[in-house]
Amino acid sequence: MRAISNSRQEISIFYTDSNHRVHDIIYSSATGNWAPGTISSMNYVTHPSSALSAMYNQCQLCANTTIMAYQDVNGFVQIANQSSAGWTLTQLNLGPIIGTGLALHPFFRLGYEDQINLFYQKSTLNTSLASWLPAGLNNGGTSPKNPISSTCVNKTLQVSAWKGDEQVYNVALPATPLAAASAYTNVSTGFDTWIQVLQLSGQGIEVSTWSGAINDVSNDSLCSITLPCSRTPPALDLRRKPSNNSLQWLEYYYHPSSMANSSINVKIYGSVAVTAIGSAFAVVGEPGNETIQSWQVNSDLLDWTTTGTVDIGDSWI
């Protein structure tokens, strides 16, 4: 099951039935009612071990309204995209482990549609990143001037496309749940952005945090000196922390104390989720006591504060 909401105060919940067919129900604040969505009519069938991930409108420049990811019966990751024309499906050849975690989030790009990041786990157990890049940031033959700058001209044709294996990270627990979220704030020097990526380890919930000021393109000298014409920022690389660089992973594979496991008081973590306001949630199983626990990221973007616990008895969600 996966739930998302948007600025129009709509909530969509995606789930699968006993035959593993994908359904959605949508809440509208305008009517105060829940109503079935349309994805079930597409007969998208998942692998029995499939995770689900979803995000709403990619950005104000985009035609799509909902993007959803799942793993099909053959093990391929499928991206379902809903626009005014209906649902369309794109198959990604990523070589994922069966039961891979899936985590979609938008990544802001000034003047373009947002980049879409998809975190998943390969059959080698490495967590990995695939990205959909808007046309102005992808490579190909001849192209017009960069839409941001009147003087910076790309020399290659730009075609929107998914790119697999953008980054390959460390080995993780098999079929670890994954969650990711991002947010940005417009400031005088560009855009302060953060990304939080959550996964499980033997020590509890593992968090990687990226932050940086991106896409300040007021100076065309960036074209020839700092970044290529596409203004692609440095890669989101979990394997290292760049020095003297405003685009960096502040911490990677970090275990906040509030999310840590204990050899004395063992916790069994299940599904994880994180939102664009820095709130995280997890199903936590302890002997005879399963709960949903929540945390809020602190202002340093690294430490997390426990914000609440809901007892759900002995049932897993």
Image (cartoon, rainbow, N blue to C red):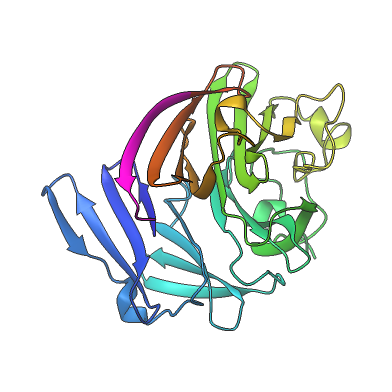
On the question of residue 2 being in view, the answer is: yes
Q: How many marks?
A: 0
Q: Which residue is nearer to you in this view: 174 or 34?
A: 174
Q: Which residue is nearer to you in this view: 110 or 23?
A: 23
| Residue 55 spot, x, y in % from top left | 45, 52
Quarter of the figure with residue 151: top right
Prevailing secondary structure class for the magenta stretch in the rendered image: strand
Q: Say whether residue 122 is magenta.
A: no
Q: Which residue is nearer to you in this view: 189 or 182?
A: 182
Quarter of the image with the N terminus is bottom left
On the question of residue 64 being in view, the answer is: no
Residue that appears at 62% across and 42% down: 197
Quarter of the figure with residue 95: bottom right
| Residue 124 spot, x, y in % from top left | 78, 66
Residue that appears at 53% across and 78% down: 72
Image vertical order of residue 65 relative to residue 91, above or below:
above
| Residue 24 spot, x, y in % from top left | 30, 65
Quarter of the image with the C terminus is bottom left
- Magenta-colored span: 306-316
Quarter of the figure with residue 134: bottom right
Q: Say whether residue 311 is magenta.
A: yes
Left or right relative to 67: residue 147 = right
Image vertical order of residue 177 relative to residue 196, above or below:
below
| Residue 315 spot, x, y in % from top left | 34, 55
Image vertical order of residue 73 relative to residue 36, above or below:
below
